[in-house]
Image (spheres, rainbow, N blue to C red):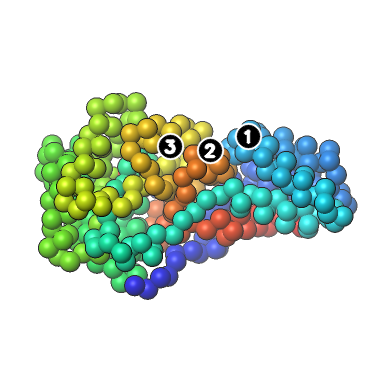
Amino acid sequence: MNLIKNINFDKLKSGLKKTREKVMEGISELISGKAEIDNSTLEQIEEILITSDIGIETATTIIERTRERMVYDADRSKEHFYNSIKAEMSGILRSQNIESKIEEFKPFVILIVGVNGAGKTTTIGKLAHNYKKMGLNVVIGSADTFRAAANEQLEIWAKRAGVDLVQSNSGADPSSVAFDTLKIASANNADIVLIDTAGRLHTKNNLMTELKKIKTVLSKVFSYAPNEIYLVLDGNTGQNAIQQAKEFSKYVEVSGLILTKLDGTAKGGVIFQLCSENKIPVRYIGVGESIEDLQDFDPNTFVDAFFNNQDK
Ligand SMILES: Nc1nc2c(ncn2[C@@H]2O[C@H](COP(=O)(O)OP(=O)(O)O)[C@@H](O)[C@H]2O)c(=O)[nH]1
Ligand SMILES: [Mg+2]
């Protein structure tokens, strides 16, 4: 397996433009005229962070830790401040690489969940593309049997990525499609399986129960499956994403988050809150609608892009 990570810094930087403007410009303006960063400046910065989607607790933690760092440090320059706050911000973000685990299981099974419109199907297409580029044999299962158009949409993505798709009839039992997908993947010697599911409102118990059923059925084919359950969250939803992560976690063991649509939103700061409150790592981020636009999430790169173009 060829372990290439899909990280394109320029694309990430331009994708984060609106979020950066919302969060960082205020901070940048505040410090631009100052030679040194003092306590009252830190308090004002804290206020800016609190009013962004970073959230009160997370913003307070970031500033407290930055303040502690600065207490033991004589250097009060802006540059030093930026380095300190960047270190604290990336320390809050959690990522995790699964590449080493992929080789331990054949097939490695990933179940994709999330509310309607979050970007699940699109993300599966992009993921399939990324894994195929690594030299993996990918099979997608279409367990979104709720909408008739779901199959067609997934078919387009599977074609684009050049991978196999196990289709379903509209109205079929999603669990049986999941079952068939694993059987076919096994027969085809697949390395990795991606299972798409219907967009379910987290408030609907019956749909959440269905998700649990899919999970149980997967484990009947391979006792270890699913290896991962990724929750796809729309970056535009801001605080709602936090709630969705909590709700889904009540029903299934969400092992990773995928935050989409970071390119169109000013609410991308929510990623800090997601990581600090839910303690679930972010695996991938969506920064556009094309097949190349799903990037591996790396905290340091993310924070660098977040701070880029700032007054230093
Ligand atoms: N700009 C942008 N749009 C995205 C991204 N991910 C998904 N989308 C769009 O979000 C919409 C819903 O996506 P879809 O995959 O159908 O969501 P699903 O209902 O969760 O399967 C589509 O129009 C996608 O093109 C992203 O990272 N950036
Ligand atoms: Mg879908």
The residue closer to the viewer here, 78 or 223, is 223
Q: Amino acid at mark 2?
A: Glu
Seen in the picture, residue 305 relative to 196 is either above or below; the reply is: below
The residue closer to the viewer here, 27 or 303, is 303
**Mark found first going from the N terminus, 1 or 3:** 1
Residue name at image x 18 percent, y 44 percent: 217
Q: Position of residue 140 (x, y in %)?
A: 23, 55
Residue name at image x 73 percent, y 53 percent: 84
Give the residue at mark 3.
Answer: 245
Query: CA separation, marks 2 and 3?
Result: 10 Å
* Mark 1 and mark 2 residues within 8 Å of each other at the beta carbon: yes
**Mark found first going from the N terminus, 1 or 2:** 1
Give the residue at mark 2.
Answer: 277
Q: Is residue 55 visible?
A: yes
Q: Amino acid at mark 3?
A: Ala
Q: Is residue 151 visible?
A: no
Q: Residues within 10 Å of mark 3 (few under 14, many from 20)?
A: many
Q: Residues within 10 Å of mark 1 (few under 14, many from 20)?
A: few
**Element at badge 3?**
helix
Query: CA separation, marks 1 and 3?
Result: 17 Å
Residue name at image x 80 percent, y 50 percent: 70
Give the residue at mark 1.
Answer: 57
Which callout, 2 or 3, points to the residue nearer the camera? 2
Residue name at image x 36 percent, y 47 percent: 230
